[in-house]
Image: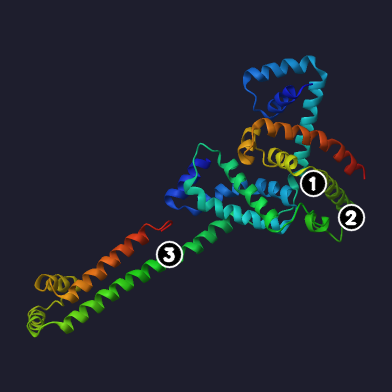
Amino acid sequence: MDSKTEDDLLLHWSGEADPKLSAEIEALLEKDPAAQRYLDELDQLNVLRDELADLPVMNSSRSFALEAVTARKVTRFPLPWIAAAAAAAVIAVIAVGTKSWLHEGTSQVEEVVVKEKESSNEPATRAKLSKRLFSTRPQDPALERISIARDRARKLRTELNHLPNS
Amino acid sequence: MDDSLLIRKFCSDGDGDAAVELLGKYQRALYQFIWQMLHHSQDCEDAMQETFSKALLALPRYREENHFKSWLFRIGRNEAIEIIRRRRRTVVAEAPEECLGTDPLIDRQPAAREVMEQRERLQSLDRAIAQLPDAEREVLALRLQGDLPFKEIAEVINIPIGTVLARMHRAKKRLKPLLESELNE
């Protein structure tokens, strides 16, 4: 029996032969005892496979799949914390910048802010205050620092959002 | 559930249960294949952990034109090869007691004696397969224990299918006397 026939028999045994090849092999098996013997030996490998099904003894309660998924969740855990820390840093930078600017500001602006605060029962939110400050003193160096800090914070947040698995 | 669906559920929805089900389907077969490569429990467990971790990490890049099972087995094979390389360990068979477990009551009970005989037989079969050359044992294990078709074995090992068939043929031929010798001992 040549190696081509052996290959064909292996494919037939494995169920990978196309219908044409299968038909040829079936015809060969009927007239060639050596081919039939070869196929019988291959079938013995299936018996061997069944016998080896219990080998090796593996701890049945252990799930590598579950362990891998759990481990992945654990490694992903710090990412939200990094994002939260970055957001906190952004807020801190803005707050420090605003405070610094207020201290540097003229008494006139401070008066306006105080007056507005007094005239309204609602406390001035950071957004409103920030908007007002930017509109009244666009050229102030402190405002520029705040603006730069905000841009950096925005870039940082964008980069964090583009991190894999975020 | 279908592999593709489980992969989608994991990648799109972050469904961890889908990933556990997907990997769990192939855990046993993969362990048996890696066992045939390493013959060492601790190494097998290390390889399994690494394989599944890497598979989860790479799953978003998985393409459906490949079969998931053969894709997973390829990662497992690479991991086993890496362990062999890293630890400079060729195939080292474990002590039979460690591999198959021991029972102090075995000699006292007839049923237990049968269990012992069965274990000894398994041990002999395993020893016979372990004596095959690495390349042939690998193909045999992927076909018998991994239950992979030859076409996918060729993908896993990255060799032509003709080479896979030739190795399988040689493994079969070599295994026959090895089995006879081990079982008659």
- C-alpha gap between disc 3 and disc 1: 45 Å
**Kind of residue sitting beneath label 1:** Ala
Residue located beneath label 2 in the image: B109
Residue located beneath label 1 in the image: B130
Residue located beneath label 3 in the image: A79
Q: Quadrant of residue A66?
A: bottom right
Q: Is residue A88 visible?
A: yes
Quadrant (top left/top right/bottom left/bottom right) for the C terminus of chain B: top right
- C-alpha gap between disc 2 and disc 3: 57 Å
| Element carrying mark 1 | helix
Q: Do dots 3 and 1 share one subunit?
A: no
Q: Is residue A61 visible?
A: no
Counting labels gives 3
**Kind of residue sitting beneath label 2:** Gln
**Kind of residue sitting beneath label 3:** Leu
Could you tell whether B16 is left or right of B25 in the image? left
Pinpoint residue B99: horizontal percent, then vertical percent. Answer: 78, 55
Q: Do dots 2 and 1 share one subunit?
A: yes
Sort mark 1 into few (<14), some (14-19) or many (20+) by Cα contacts within 10 Å.
many
Sort mark 2 into few (<14), some (14-19) or many (20+) by Cα contacts within 10 Å.
few
Chain hosting mark 1: B
